[in-house]
Image (tube, rainbow, N blue to C red):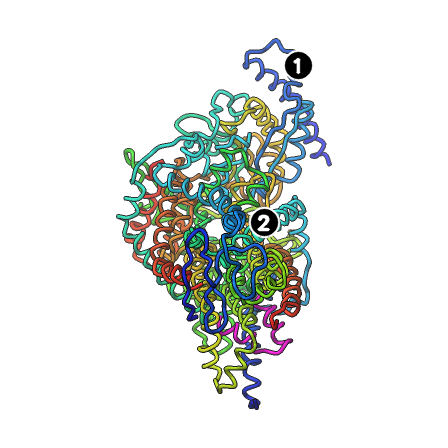
Amino acid sequence: MAVHSERVQAPSPDAGEAVVDGTGTTVAGGGAGGAGPKRTRPPGAPGLGSRFAPYLLLLPATLATIALLGWPLVKTVLLSFQNLNRRQLVMHLTEWTGFDNYKEQLTDPDFWSVTGRTVVFTLVNVVLIMVGGTLVGLLLNHLGKRMRLALSISLLMAWAMPVVAATTVYTWLFDQQWGVVNWFLDQLGWHSMADYNWLSSQYSTFFVVILLIVWQSIPFVAFNMYAALTTIPKELYEAARMDGAGSGKIFSLVIFPNLKPFFLATTFLEVIWVFKSFTQVYAINGGGPENLTRTLPVHAFLEGSSGQHYGIGSAIAVLTILMLGALMAYYFRIMIKQEDEL
Amino acid sequence: MRRSLFGRTWPNVIAVVLFVFFIFPVYWMVATSFKQDRDIISKTPVFLPLDGTLDHFTTAVNAPNFWTYVANSVTATVGAVLLSLVIATLASFAIARMKFRGRKAFVLVVMIAQMAPWEVMTIAVYMISRDNDMLNSLLPLTLFYMMMVLPFTIWTLRGFIAAVPKELEESAMVDGCTRTQAFVKVIFPLLAPGLMSTSLFGFITAWNEFPLVLILNKEEGKTLPLWLSSFKTAFGNDWGATMAASTMFAIPVLILFIFLQRKAVGGLTDGAVKG
Amino acid sequence: MKRQLIAAVGVAAMVVGLAACGSDGKKSDGDSKSSSSSAADKYKGKTLKVWLMTGSAPKGWTDAVKADFETTYPGSKVDFQIQEWDGIGPKVTAALSEGSVDVLEIGNTQTAGYAASGGLLDITKDKSALGGDGWAANQNEAAILDGKQYAAPWWVSNRVVAYNKDLWAKAGLTDTPKTLDEFYTDLDKLKGTEGVADPIYLPGQEWYTYFGLLTGEGGKIAKKDGDKWVGGLSSPEAQKAFETYKKLQGYSATGPKDKDEATPQQKDVFAKGNVGAMIALGWELPKPEEMAKDKIGFFPLPGKTADKPSGVFLGGSNLAVASQSKNTDMAKDFLKVALNDKNEGLVAAAGNIPNKAALNSQITGDFAKAAQTAAAVGGITPNTPNWASVEDKPNPIKDFLTAALQGGDYAATAKKYDDEIAKRLNQKQ
């Protein structure tokens, strides 16, 4: 996307001609109301309405975010500085404790091992999901109509499955005695697996959890990939093919550049979702064995809601947001930079 | 463009393997919901419940207030999805197509809003709702669900809007459309796939939401995830009923998909992609 | 027939008796002048919110109590809300903070915690009016914190051995065992019988049974040492109880050492018909169409000697009034109706142990009769506000059992989990 954009940041866009790059894409200028002369933005000072148009368009979203997200977020931060347990909640007591909750967590080695584990857990999942999802999306684009429909339906079912139900089914699939997976491995001749207890160790528990998350997340990436692929004009493929490009080349020359924003955005979302994934980790083995599969959200929940130490829970929640923010900082920069290219 | 037999076959082979991989757990859920209790736990798995039973479904549907739960879930979910689509379409158009001061800041806020860990913020949301006397109502639930999916919806729609070639919009404007008309006539139809995936996403998210409704609506305004969990008791889980309930719970999402997919495909072909 | 008639007459007599009690109780409120009709009208137009847990109230109980209360106080309404177990802790806390619930069912092991939170009304003064003088002491213990009464015991239940009569007959067993040694002999016989996969099904994390054994040995799961709690797994009693548990669990070839009785549901395992016995609650039985009722027999888990059975865990529920309820008088009057001998009799008839020993004669069913024998040697978890957090996932007692059954060094394992128990019990409120 070699667009050399002029960053028009002035409140009123100047009257100059819009920049047109080689492929003929016009860089958007300020908002414009009426019809203008051919191929160029309407010159002159736009009316008051269009000057404020973007702000008007953003108003509902901004208000909603402030009221419905900003407020709870601020409240969470406030709670994290309180000693808020069952008694304080029932009796409506406010007991400020300063940084006690934070000190307790930050000096707790468990907190740090949970944090490290969460990062690795997130990376492994996201790589698997992105690679898997992209391949499945490409495959969808490649298949005949019927096969595509069949695969789409199975993907959707996996995606649409209620998380609670999916987790329960996976618990059953991997059950030590009655699970189909062990039965299947046994039938294949791997007899030592006939009675294997998947939840007995950290890695095997993570295997089940990761499989579950990847299984449920791939459809999202695949569908989006497929939807995005359909927005690439067919001419581009044809042009590439005429130039003699193979599948790999087509991916790197046509698909990837066109879908770069898609990859960035999807990876971004998956990192967040996996990092935050709670039900799967919690319900499969409750963060066990021996708390070895606790991730940050599960940790926050077990310490906070489950143990009804809401102040501590809120502190871990705030730390979780900060950790995620730190993890995403680099990403934010790329994304923001990419904004300039629009 | 000759392709070997292998070249034509392998995508289908992989597709079949993937089909099984993705569908089997779902099948297992459905199959389990029809099984007699003694077949649910069985050393040799019962793959086809031939002597099936509808008992689990009866248990699930006869749970108290089932239909109220259905109505509540539908109201909150559909309300949240529609609201977020409207709000997000406005916002995403602005950030995809307009330049203005504060645009980057807004994009940053959307990105950060994505990270909100709602599961651990429930207590704050609860205290706010409690102190404003908004418990046991569908309104706060709908609004918060809307907020849960809003950043994602803005994010995705904006990508879709940005992907629509600007020439299309411009040529419409050359033809005498106003910018609003150009949006409605040109961009909006092309957004169909985007609207499809975002509303599906929103639907699934809101439809599944559990931790918040658990604590917000303890009497009126309960939704289906609470009903799902009601087959778990302190004395153990009724797996058959849980699976039957899960099966029924997943059906609306499937219907929605089939419906939306047709729309989306229609929108694509009707759209003026080729000018 | 005759028995039913007697029961009916008895119930009628009790209702009359209770009506008398009720008016006695009202006098103590001070306003003795009010005529009976205006007293009955005092809750006109008011609705009482009562929270019960799913599957807790016996069949017919809610209808009977609602009808009784609404007849006694015309124009009043009782609104029963059935709550699911999932996430119940935060949910109850929230409801207590709102004052949106008037009366609620609370697990007996959880009562102290809620009492300490300030969410439950002190009903010490109303105890006798509620019939508290007749409450079984080992049940009432769980409703008291620091000498104050915060709830009324409603019912308890405990586990007994449920056995497959066909398999026992096949193994040549004609009588139920009276001592643990006899039981082991029976299990050995069952083991050699064709068609028996497991003489007894006992998963490794069935901590209620272990807790019962511990109680029977005279031990405690945790004790207060000064103002600090210490775990009791390292005590000699606990080790003895564990030896018994280990021996029993050893008979369960298919019982996973790291699972509890709910995964899979032991009733479903039992229903397959190749399991000799299991240790179960009254509602944890296969459905009649899966296994005929008369195929299942019950006896309390025997003790080391024939004079008393092994100890049991007395799990159950209390009824409490929310301190922030706007209808506390109405709530107390509701408790009087809900816990009167007639309605408590329904609890007994459904196979639970009622809150008064005097009502034990109304217990019906083979299960409940076996359970009743053992209930006398039953105990409950330490009565301290933090107890509930010990039962939170991951429950250290369950993990202890798994670790010790898997052959971990007893002393070291016990020490480790004692520390965890102590840590949880000593958390600040």
Magenta-colored segment: predominant secondary structure: helix
Question: Which residue is labeled 1 in the image?
Answer: C36
Q: Secondary structure at mark 1?
A: helix
Relative to A179, is C7 on the left or the right? right
Q: Chain of mark 1?
A: C
- Mark 2 closeness class: few <14, some 14–19, many ≥20 residues within 10 Å: some
| Region in magenta | A134-156
Looking at the image, which is closer to me, B128 or A263?
A263
Picture coordinates of residue A256 (x, y %)?
46, 73
Asked where in the image residue C347 lies, by quadrant, the reply is: top right
Relative to C311, is C169 on the left or the right? right
Q: Is residue B151 above or below residue A241?
A: above
Looking at the image, which is closer to me, B152 or C304?
B152
Q: Judge depth for marks 1 and 2 and give the one in front.
A: 2
Q: Are marks 1 and 2 on the same chain?
A: no
Real-space CA distance between mark 1 and mark 2, rounded to the nearest whole angstrom? 56 Å
Looking at the image, which is closer to me, B77 or C368?
B77
Q: Which mark is residue B83?
A: 2
Q: Is residue C319 above or below residue C84?
A: above
Picture coordinates of residue A137 (x, y %)?
52, 72
Q: Which mark is residue A81?
A: none
Picture coordinates of residue A313 (x, y %)?
38, 44
- Mark 1 closeness class: few <14, some 14–19, many ≥20 residues within 10 Å: few
Residue B257 visible from this viewpoint: no
Q: Is residue C322 magenta?
A: no
Q: Residue at x 58, y 57 (%)?
A: B179
Quadrant (top left, top right, bottom left, bottom right) of the N terminus of chain B: bottom right
